[in-house]
């Protein structure tokens, strides 16, 4: 299930407060500045830095 556009507009990276990009294939929210992906579990974004996955 896709994340709502309204929710995506208000969410920000907890580390740098930057914008997030929804990546449907990875089922997560990506901060390109921090190179982190915040997973979405049971349609709920997990916005914890400790739970974020580093991307390259």
Image (cartoon, rainbow, N blue to C red):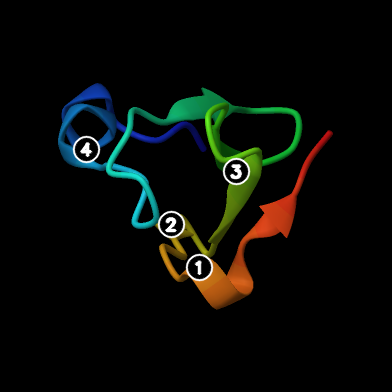
Question: Mark 3 to mark 2: distance in Å?
Answer: 7 Å
At mark 4, the secondary structure is helix
At mark 3, the secondary structure is strand
Looking at the image, which is closer to me, 17 or 12?
A: 17
Identity of the residue drawn at 62% across and 27% down: 23
At mark 2, the secondary structure is strand
Q: Which residue is mark 2?
A: 45
Identity of the residue drawn at 84% across and 33% down: 56
Q: Position of residue 43 (x, y in %)?
A: 46, 55
Q: Which residue is mark 3?
A: 28
Q: Which mark is residue 7?
A: 4
Identity of the residue drawn at 53% across and 29% down: 33
Q: Earlier in the sequence, mark 3 or mark 4?
A: 4
**Residue 17 placement: quadrant:** top left
At mark 1, the secondary structure is helix
Q: Position of residue 42 (x, y in %)?
A: 52, 64
Are the residues at dot 2 and dot 4 in contact (C-beta closer than 8 Å)?
yes
Q: Which residue is mark 1?
A: 49
Are the residues at dot 3 and dot 2 in contact (C-beta closer than 8 Å)?
no
């Amino acid at each position: 299930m896709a994340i709502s556009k309204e929710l995506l507009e208000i969410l920000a990276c907890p580390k740098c407060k930057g914008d997030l990009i929804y990546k449907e294939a990875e089922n997560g929210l990506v901060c390109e500045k921090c190179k982190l992906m915040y997973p979405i579990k049971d349609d709920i974004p997990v916005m914890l830095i400790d739970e974020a996955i580093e991307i390259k």
